[in-house]
Amino acid sequence: MQQRRELDQVYTNRKLLNGQLDTPKWWAPTVTILGIVVVLGLIVIAVMINKGLGMTGLARPVYWGLFITTFVFWVGISHAGIMISAILRLTQAEWRRPVTRAAELLTVFSLLTALVFPLIHAGRPWRIAYWIMPYDLARGIYPNIRSPLIMDPVAISTYLTGSTLFLYIALLPDLGNLRDRTTGWKNAMYTVLALGWRGNPRQWKMQTVGGILLSALMLPIFVSVHSIVSWDFAVASAVEGWHSTIFAPYFVIGAVHSGVSAVVTMMALMRWLWKWDDFIRPEHFDALARLLIVVSTGWLGFTFLELIFALYGQDAPEIALREMQMFQWPWNGLFILFFLTAYAIPVPMWLFKRVRTNIALMFWTSILVNIGMWLERFLIIVPGLARRTPFVYTWEAYRPSAVEWTIFIWSFAWVTFLMLLFSKFFPLVPLFEQKESQVFTTDVMIGRAKVPAIIREAD
Amino acid sequence: MSTQSILGLFQQPESAADAMDGLKEAGFELGTFDVLTGTPYPEGAFGEYVPQHRLFRFPAFGAIIGFTLSIFLTSVTQLAYPMVTGGKPILSIFAMLIIMYEMTMLAGVIATVIGIVFESRLPNMKPGIYDTRITEGWIGVVVTFDDDSKVADAESVLNKAGALEIKHAK
Amino acid sequence: MASEAVAHESEHHAPPPQVAADVIAQELIATTTGATGRFKAWAWILGILSIAGIVALIVKFIDQGDDSTKWGYVAAMVSFLLSLAGGAPMVAMAPVMAKANWVRPITRIASLFSFAGVATLIMLIPLVAILPPLVTEGARRRTVWFMAPDYSPHFWTTLGLVLLLVTGIMLFYSAALPDFASMRDHSTGWRQRLGKRLARGWVGTDAQWRTLRMRIGMFGTFYFFILVFVNFLISTDFGQSMVPGWRDAIFPMYHTVSGFQAGVAGVVIALYFSRKYMKLEKYVHMDAFWSLGRLLFALTLLWIYFFYSSFIVFWYGRSENDIATLDLLIKGPMMPVFIAAMLLIWFVPWWILIWNKVRRGTGAMVVGSFIILIGLLLDRIRTFVPAWSVPPDQIHEKWLKVIPDAYWPSIFDVLIMVGGISLVALIVMLMTRVIPVLSVWQVQEFNLLSKPIKYIRGHATLVAKPD
């Protein structure tokens, strides 16, 4: 049941702009520590680029390991933004309001992070610059557009550009608000960024109509991006466990699962860190958890289909792979852990309203889901390659090196660092959406019952 | 004759709507007065003039440009530097479709964003009379004039509607 | 909340009129009586065509019951009817679970399609008899049943379809209890007696309403899972399994999602005709068509997404079975059917439904829906006819070595197809004589929860959200 709160605009401004107008005490130390981790990670990346990929555990036959897993993971997390922002906007769900900007932000930053991985994964990353402009045409070749590895950057860049622009457009009213609340250099910065926003009906109408139009345009992009990433694997007929037609929707729904869980994690942190109890309420977690139950059950269906049809072909290498995944250590251990964390523990818990409205439990279960979903990508990518280890006379199984783990941790620190940096200058909860909900929601008496209601414009 | 504008500030939406009605009755032309709010209200809530827009043309236009560019990029480059990979034809329409689709959508999105900014009549670095309390819940009714003769009329309408303050700008 | 591009105030549609609850009950119940001459004529025509179809089915079974390669069109019809009659009740279930207000008046017409599942079952019976067991000539074909008994597909598909029919009817009945009570109170004759029996003492207490909502949720969820299950079985056991080397993990979901598309299209068509000929403009607003239009548009785009996902993997793979699968279903003898299906199920509806004006109206929406249904039928023909055309002795190969020729439907196949569709339409039409085509209590609820208001100087709709 939606709980309606009467919150006046002065209060809303003061609370939701507290990150920009006053800096919370924990902000500077946290950003400093994260900054140190980020710099350390960048140093490790630089060393790896200098010394070569031999510093990682990658070798024949496991050419794609932690980096690609983490790449797919971050692309997956990025799907939260459009799911929450676009789909819930189009279906006019009121409970999306506190989350849309943070989710879109997570999209932008996780995509940026995801893009880093294919770059550092190349043996000679500086050659990739030539992919853009000017290409080394003297060698008589041009990027092969038939390769999913070329389609990937095109799709991710499209999604990144679209999300960033969408974020900026939706930020305009709040930039106007910040311009009105600040002085000095901050005022000058926000004045420029707000482009002269005033809040007349034309501008608000463009926000509404434009928001819906952009949502409708971003949705097909959102579906296509992770599908294209999945086709990196699905089109390869030579690797067992990869050549399956279901990869595209399977990856997309898995991405929504992990992305929305990441949004839950983020919302809990936002509520606790900035004390936004009035704006991020248990009913939001309840609604998100219900969405997650549906999405995760759909994801489970797709997982089941993928497994069934892997075995359907009665193909000896494929069956050997699945036996390795289910019965051989360490794959079976990872598999059990993956299933427990991605579905078996969180989802039954979410069936209970007491859990759905308990923010601490939602926080921890959402983290569990993302551990599970990272493992899911790992189990899709690596075993198919690792199965061939005995055949290529490699002595050791794939073991991610310290360099890989450092860069993995760096990616989390980088995203969090960027989010916190953003929060210093721009509000994480869209103020105008909160204020809009005050205007567009009311209580209505039906008999003796006070029922929340929303006001819809006449079509 | 200097262009003047005045801004009446209200705290209640009803009063602002009364002011808008009053201005209409006093004979002010549509388009010379407007309402400023810190939050969107349902369309027509203040009896304001609902503006026409052509936003939907922008994504269509952008998509056409993106589609054309993408056909060019995917086909001309592969024909100029042909390299057979995996036994596939040089011009593989099914693979080209993906890049064509992404570039079409990208161009559509960029064009839409340009459209939103343009149709919002932004950027407007000289936005005119304004008050920072509008983003604190106050509602502003702004009236622009070509000459000074109607300023007093407008002021009296705003005062009658219950304006808490009236600001002037030259 | 948001308005689309509205050029002028005069283009705003007037909010729906408020109608008193007893007037709603009387007017909607009155729709069950007074069938016009046109209605009766159509009922007769559809009845004759349905009987002709069933007779043709029996004759075909007697004549060609030992040759499974001639049953492709019947398999395609079973799949099509499952999609249409099975998918439509999802409109009664899914938006309700999402607490959408617009769907309240139209849930009844969507759930009436579950009765039309009888048509699917009738078509399935001979097909189950003809479907080869998993082991033929000593070898087991590729199947999702792995080591299960040989007749597992036969058993489980039949059971699944029966369960789907039963659950669909239970979903209908759970939601219809208050309307049977209304009929008990307002109807006359046999309808009044039927209402009294089926209302089972409904008086509208709090506890009864709570139980009703719980049942709708429960049966709705079951229905969804059983529908997915049956789609999975029909698409694999009656489709993929018949073709050696066709391994397509997305095909069951493709089948299911295009089934939802057909279901929504069917609901649009039924809604259009009911609204027009039973004069229900007061109760079925543009809101419903607008939302159904958006849903249909999204599902149309999903079709091409699922299709392309499977196609691109085969196209890149280029192994013998990938190439053979593409030849069989797309590039080979079925290419004209494939192109027609793709145009009608995706390309044309996309360009019809993309326009706001279309989705706000009824005429073009219905045309789009008909086009989608024709396209879906062609798509099912494209997949099931070649699958069943594969000679049984090839079924144990690693991949399809010889692509079977396409063949036109025989006169029996045509009669069966026409009969099947007629039977679905007839069942839905006849059910509107038994119970009001719009759910009385949900229209009353819609009126209670949704009111036009004046907001300061503008017009808006106030929508209460009790849950």
Image (cartoon, helix red, strand yellow):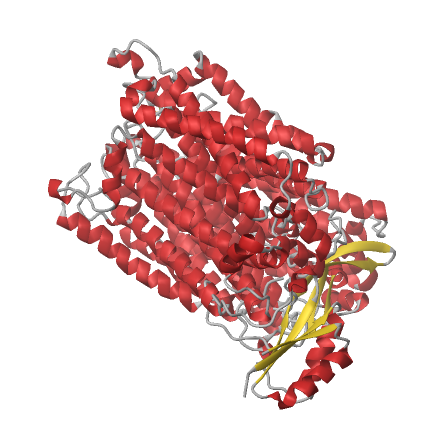
Dividing the picture into quadrants, the one containing residue B145 is bottom right
| Residue farthest front in this picture | A184
Q: Is residue B166 above or below residue C99?
A: below
Q: Residue furthest top?
A: A395
Q: Quadrant of residue C11?
A: bottom right
Query: Relative to residue C235, is residue A429 drawn left or right?
Result: right
Residue C417, image x, y percentages:
44, 54
The answer to whether residue C189 is left or right of residue C458 is: right
Instruction: Examine the rendering and report whether any part of residue C151 can be seen.
Output: no
Whether residue C245 is visible: yes
Q: Nearer the viewer, residue C335 or B110?
A: B110
In this view, the residue in front, C55 or C284, is C284
Q: Position of residue C226 (x, y in %)?
A: 57, 38
Task: Tell me where residue A227 sits by quadrant.
Answer: top left
The residue nearer to you, when weighing C336 against C153, is C336
Residue at 48 percent across and 20 percent down: it is A335
Left or right: where A378 falls relative to C20: left
- Residue B96 location, x and y as percent? 27, 49
The total of numbered circles placed on residues is 0
Q: Residue A375: image x %, image y %? A: 47, 24
Q: Residue at coordinates 49% horizontally, 59% vertically from top-left?
A: A192
Image quarter (top left, top right, bottom left or bottom right) of the C terminus of chain A: bottom right
Q: Is residue C15 left or right of residue A344?
A: right
C131 vs A108, nearest the viewer: A108
Q: Residue at x 41, y 47 (%)?
A: A159
